[in-house]
Structures are given as structure tokens and as C-alpha cells.
Amino acid sequence: MQEKILSGIKVIEMSTYVAGPCCAKILGEWGADVIKIESSKGDGWRYNGETTDDNNPIFATDNYGKKFISINMKSEEGAKIVYRLLENADIFITNFRTDALKRLNLTYEELQERYPELIYAQVQGYGDKGPLKDKPGFDSTAFFARSGILLDIAEAGEIPCNSPATVGDHTLTLAILSGILAALYNRTKTGKGDLVTSGLYQSAIYLLSSMLVESQLGIKYPMSRKRAIDPISNTYKCKDGLWIMVAGTNYLAYLPKFAQLTDLPELMENEKYNSPVGGILYSEEITAMIEKRMLTKTRDEWMRIFEEGDFPCEVVQHIPDVLEDDQAWANDYLREVKLANGDTRIFANTPVTIQSQGTPEFKHPPKIGGDTREVLKEMGYTDDVIDKWMSKGVIFG
């Protein structure tokens, strides 16, 4: 296998929870040397799920493969260690809010003067301007609640659903990662670093690009599946209680085939139904007609009919179903890992495949400060100095 594409790149990560840590993890998968700085209490995400040092898959998902050091960054000696770490770093990733960064003297403006080639990436909640700039932003609040997703992807008339964990964070991860890589490439031309920012609210707004435009054209959310804009692009329950998704996304083009495969000739023969406008005006009638027909066969039977007829369709699965999905395993979208205590867990792989890079090694995160001594010794500090700092509470491990 050829050398990793980011070999030689050094990343200092000072972030918590999911988006920033996951971004650093992916950079590490592609060859970067990633050092994560934690406080003595560690990243708050460590305390979700199974919390033993060698059996914490929730934390490991976004943190494997890094070196972990723990520093009291409020101490004078701790601050000097952070500056030393940044001296030969290429990328700094943080999700600390700007006021906290000011107190630590780690704002972009301060570091830009010291390290002009540094790419500084700040993961934000609501952005760095406006009335909410200092408000803590989380996946459930800034991404799902304020953006409209919780209310407007629900069935019309129903209460908001609970937001699924870290979906917004991982969406933000890919956004901030793309900006970092673009800045890294630009540095090869200019020799200068840059400030890269992206936030949960920002990435949610972008995710809803089409819906934002549609809402200005008279399309109202939330919608009801019983009154879909396109009744042949909808979910339907089958005879066995399982659900199927049909996706005739061009009503005029797909209606003849759909009518044939479902044995509903009236969809074509009745002039009320056989045009895009008719599909909208009479959506409730058409949907009810299709619902009745779909209940005559099991999901497997309908899937066979639609797939043999080359009509876009898919089973509607639960999340645990994905863990046993042959399609996911065939493409290496998942992998099974044995933890130190002998337990096995299934992890999602990074959603980008680079042929030359292969599957990255899984190295479970150590305890808080587990690599502090090793990293400081690599920086040239002696055991005596490290022991002294440990005793004074400057570093932990």
C-alpha cells in the first residue's frame, strides 16, 4: 500500500463531543498525526454509554487512532505546552466558543500571528456573529430544532420527533473537513494558513437547501404521506406490516409503469389522475387506492415485482437492520472490531473510499491523558520535568 495521503501532516485537536473529534479522526485515518488535548475530566462524550477505558464504542467511534494528552490549559506551564504543540502543527481543530478561546489566548487572531501557516478550524453552534453567537449549540438544538427539521420532517399534525443522536454533528464533520482540506491545498500555493469555520445551524440550513426554496414557492411543510405531492413517490405498508418506499420521482414518466406493476389501470385510464397536476390535486384519492393495493402482498413480494420491473423502490429498514445488511458489508461501509475486553462492536467506516488508502487501523482511545508522557517526551521534555508537572497538576496521565 502506498504512503497515506496526509502523512507528515500534524493535527492538534482541542474539541469535545462529536463534530470536531470526528473531523480529526478522519484526518488521522488518512495519515495525519493527531494529538487530542483534554482537560483532567476529559471529553464529555467519554461518559456516554459504556465508559470503561477499553470498552467505550460510543466514544471510540469518533476518537480512535489519536494520541491523547491531558493539560491544565489555564496554568502558565500548560499554556506553554499547547503553544509548543502548535509550533509545528499544520491544523488546529477546536469547538470551544470564542469567549473561552479568548481567555486561553487561543483565538485565530492570536495564533495567526504566531503561526502564519496554521490552518485554524473552529466548529461552531450558531456562528460567530448575531444574538446567538455565545449560546451553546448542540446537535438537537442548533441543528435539528432551530432549522425546522424536527417539525417539518414529521407527519403533518403529529408532534415533533426526538432527534437522532449525532446526525447533525456528522453532517457538520463533512463540511468542516472539506474546508480544512481546501485550505490545506491552498497553502501549497500561498504558503499561508487560513480560518475555516462551520456550524451546526449553518450546515442544517444548507442541508435543507431544496426545502427552503420550495417553501417560497407555496409548498408547505410538514407534509402528510396521505397527501403526498407525488403519490407514487411515497411509503406504503405491505400485507406483513412491513413498509416499502417507491420513488417514482417523475410522475409523468413513471406513472404508466407503476400502474402496470400494481395492476391499477385506472391511474392511467382516469384523466383525473394521469397528469402531474392530477397527481397533486387528487393525491389523497390516489394514495388511498395504492394503500389498499399494497396491503394485498408482502413486502418481499412487492420488492420482487418492482425490482423486476426496474421501478425505483427500497425496503424501509430500522437502524439495527443495517448492521446485518449484505449491501453495507459488501462495500465495506461497516466493520467489526474486537475490543480489549473481548467484546465485538460494529462501526461505520468513513463515508469516502480512497482506493490507495485501504481500511485504517482501529486503535481504541486510551484513558484520559494516556499518551501525555509519550507525547511530551517526543517533544524533548525529560521524565523529571514531566513528573514535576504531573505533581503540580499541569498535566495528567
Image (cartoon, rainbow, N blue to C red):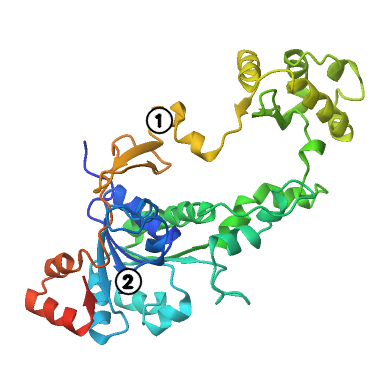
Expressed as whole percent of the image width and height from the top left, the position of residue 379 reads: 14, 69
Expressed as whole percent of the image width and height from the top left, the position of residue 297 reads: 70, 18
Q: Please give left or right for residue 170 compared with residue 132 in the image.
A: left
Q: Please give left or right for residue 153 compared with residue 364 in the image.
A: right
Q: Please give left or right for residue 187 compared with residue 272 in the image.
A: left
Q: Nearer the viewer, residue 236 or 2?
A: 236
How busy is the neighbourhood of tag 2: few (under 14 within 10 Å), some, or many (20 plus)?
A: few
The answer to whether 133 is drawn above or below residue 93 in the figure is below
Expressed as whole percent of the image width and height from the top left, the position of residue 129 reads: 58, 74
Residue placed at 77% from the left, 27% from the top? 251
Mark count? 2
Residue placed at 76% from the left, 13% from the top? 260
Q: Which mark is residue 329?
A: 1
Q: Quadrant of the N terminus?
A: top left
Expressed as whole percent of the image width and height from the top left, the position of residue 161 reads: 66, 52
Q: Amino acid at mark 2?
A: Pro
Q: Amino acid at mark 1?
A: Trp
Can you identify the residue that label 2 sits on? 116
How busy is the neighbourhood of tag 1: few (under 14 within 10 Å), some, or many (20 plus)?
A: some
Q: Secondary structure at mark 2?
A: loop
